[in-house]
């Protein structure tokens, strides 16, 4: 008998003092689909195919103990994410395969089983529209930024108790179900991925949602005390050649009747991922190229295509009143055909002190690819934000800096000049912004677009095939120095960057069945 056969037949006995922590049983009755740790690493949430979420807390003795478990979704849970512990220590976000995004708020004083499920005791369930209220000519909400959730439909025999307001039990009694503090869904196409980002300086939280038709919707919340204060920031399509519609200044959606081209055919396997740039500010090289310091970054993977989006400062006018606004544009795209399979996961590396950004992808073809993202400087003689030197009608939409300069000029000047300047601002911003806002075009590219869109270039620096099986997950550590990936064989591979900039395998971890010696 070979050594391998003997090992499989009789696992070796571990030492009396093992160098690893004992793996606890998660307690789910089905496959665990999602796992998420909070920022401190002392709380862990697991999501199962049966739609249940279990939260574990790590105690001072190093042991993990169950904190709460509840039915969050009617079917499998795709993604979980803890919100930043600095501002939201007890908030957990989840996304189910039915397309509902939910926020769960913990009540430490509640009994086990109700800590995350009694979030509506202090008020009604609040929802936000999945699309702009002007897009489908829907009436605006009655009050505030959201509106009370519509009443739940009557339960049917095929409805799970965990996803309804009340469900009839076998004895005829009603059982209360888990209610999130906040939820939203897309009426046209279910959401398949989400990402959250919080900026401590501006106290603003951003939420990005990617739907199955390739639509990317981004919300912002600048009121941390109100979970329902999400407003639509931008909406676009991430599919080349597909049309997308959004609100215009006059309240009519341009091309509202247009339908996006389907991403896949019926029965075809799909993959969608979206991730925010985790860095609070862009790297110094991008700043020199003209990217605003507070610009947002998104990496989106739809099927086998990977795209990077940035924001630029613009203004949006409504009834002649101009307001600062962040608009997304396509900054860079990975060459078509580079990924020979579905892109299962994407990750944006924290710690951009290198002067460039790093993005990693996990592909079904068995390769982990690492890309370098650089911002290109404008041509010689052209400043990044020279549009404020132009005439009012020479360039497209205004930048935020131009609005500030016009405001200062109105305060300094007086009389007729001030009124003329004010009228010029209102007319030009309203008409031009209205034309720019009619985004019934196929997509947004940096070439030939208004100023403020900085071109980026994506360069593949490493291609790693250590798994030799389809890769499902990829992620960086908090410093962006270690890259980890998990493949079909169940091994965790860790990579580090070499002095020449390439990435190489450094560690391999796998789970092995071993006999634990009795104490």
Image (tube, rainbow, N blue to C red):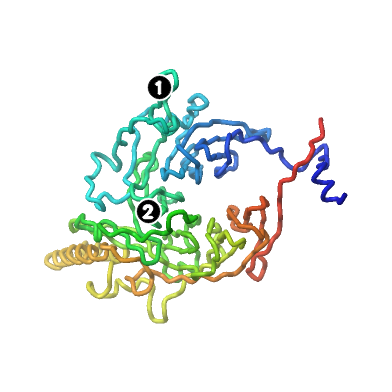
Residue 376, horizontal then vertical, whole percent: 46, 73
Residue 99, horizontal then vertical, whole percent: 42, 45
Q: Is residue 447 visible?
A: yes
Asked whether 446 or 416 is in front, the reply is 446
Q: Nearer the viewer, mark 1 or mark 2?
A: 1
Where, quadrant-wise, is the C terminus in this rendering?
top right
Q: Secondary structure at mark 1?
A: strand
Whole-number angstrom distance, CA of label 1 to CA of label 2: 37 Å
The residue positioned 68% from the left and 64% from the top of the image is 504
Of all residues shown, which one is farthest toward the bottom? 380
Height in image: 158 above or below 351?
A: above
Disc 1 marks which residue? 174
Please tell me in which quadrant of the rendered image residue 26 appears. Answer: top right
Q: Secondary structure at mark 2?
A: strand
Please tell me in which quadrant of the rendered image residue 371 appears. Answer: bottom right
Residue 467, horizontal then vertical, whole percent: 66, 58
The tag earlier along the polypeptide, 1 or 2, is 1
Q: Is residue 275 visible?
A: no
> Do residues under tags 1 and 2 come within 8 Å of each other at their CB atoms?
no
Q: For mark 2, does the 10 Å Cα neighbourhood hold few (<14), some (14 to 19), or many (20 or more) residues? A: many
Asked whether 209 or 373 is in front, the reply is 209
The residue positioned 79% from the left and 36% from the top of the image is 516
Asked whether 346 or 457 is in front, the reply is 346
Q: Which mark is residue 217?
A: 2
The residue positioned 55% from the left and 44% from the top of the image is 33
């Amino acid at each position: 008998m070979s050594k391998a056969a003997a090992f499989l037949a009789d696992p070796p006995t571990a030492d009396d003092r093992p160098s690893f922590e004992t793996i606890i049983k998660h307690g789910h009755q089905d496959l665990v689909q999602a796992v998420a740790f909070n920022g401190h690493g002392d709380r862990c949430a697991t999501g199962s195919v049966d739609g249940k979420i279990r939260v574990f807390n790590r105690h001072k003795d190093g042991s993990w103990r169950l904190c709460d478990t509840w039915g969050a979704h009617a079917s499998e849970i795709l993604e979980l994410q803890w919100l930043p512990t600095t501002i939201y220590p007890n908030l957990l976000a989840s996304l189910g395969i039915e397309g509902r995004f939910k926020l769960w708020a913990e009540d430490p004083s509640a009994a086990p089983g109700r800590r995350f499920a009694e979030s509506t005791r202090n008020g009604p369930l609040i929802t936000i529209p999945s699309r702009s209220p002007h897009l489908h000519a829907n009436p605006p909400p009655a009050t505030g930024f959201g509106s009370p959730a519509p009443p739940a439909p009557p339960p049917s025999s095929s409805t799970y108790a965990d996803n309804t307001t009340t469900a009839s039990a076998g004895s005829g009694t009603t059982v209360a179900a888990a209610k999130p503090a906040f939820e939203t869904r897309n009426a046209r196409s279910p959401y398949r991925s989400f990402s959250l980002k919080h900026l401590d300086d501006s106290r603003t939280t951003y939420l990005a949602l990617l739907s199955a038709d390739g639509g990317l919707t981004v919300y912002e919340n600048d009121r941390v005390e109100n979970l329902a204060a999400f407003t639509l920031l931008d909406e676009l399509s991430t599919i080349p050649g597909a049309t997308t519609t959004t609100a215009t200044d006059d309240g009519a959606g341009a091309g509202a009747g247009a339908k996006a081209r389907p991403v896949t055919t019926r029965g075809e396997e799909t993959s969608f991922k979206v991730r925010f740039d985790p860095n609070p500010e862009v790297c110094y090289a991008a700043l020199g190229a003209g990217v605003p310091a507070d610009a947002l970054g998104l990496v989106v993977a739809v099927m086998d295509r990977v795209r990077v989006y940035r924001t630029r400062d613009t203004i949006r006018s409504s009834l002649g009143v101009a307001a600062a606004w962040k608009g997304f544009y396509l900054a860079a795209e990975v060459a078509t055909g580079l990924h020979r399979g579905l892109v299962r996961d994407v990750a944006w590396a924290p710690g951009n002190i290198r002067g460039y950004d790093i993005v990693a992808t996990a592909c079904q073809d068995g390769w982990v690819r690492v890309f370098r993202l650089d911002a290109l400087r404008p041509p010689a003689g052209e400043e990044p934000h020279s549009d404020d030197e132009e005439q009012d009608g020479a360039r497209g939409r205004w930048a935020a800096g131009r609005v500030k300069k016009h405001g200062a000029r109105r305060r300094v000047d007086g009389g007729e000049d001030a009124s003329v300047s004010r009228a010029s601002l209102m007319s030009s911003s309203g008409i031009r912004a209205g034309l720019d806002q009619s985004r019934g075009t196929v997509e947004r590219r940096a070439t030939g677009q208004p100023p403020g869109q900085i071109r980026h270039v994506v360069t593949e620096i490493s291609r790693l095939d250590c798994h030799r099986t389809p890769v499902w997950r990829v992620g960086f550590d908090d410093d962006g120095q270690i890259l980890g990936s998990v493949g079909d064989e169940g091994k965790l591979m860790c990579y580090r960057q070499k002095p020449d900039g390439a990435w190489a395998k450094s560690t391999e971890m796998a789970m092995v069945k071993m006999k634990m010696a009795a104490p």
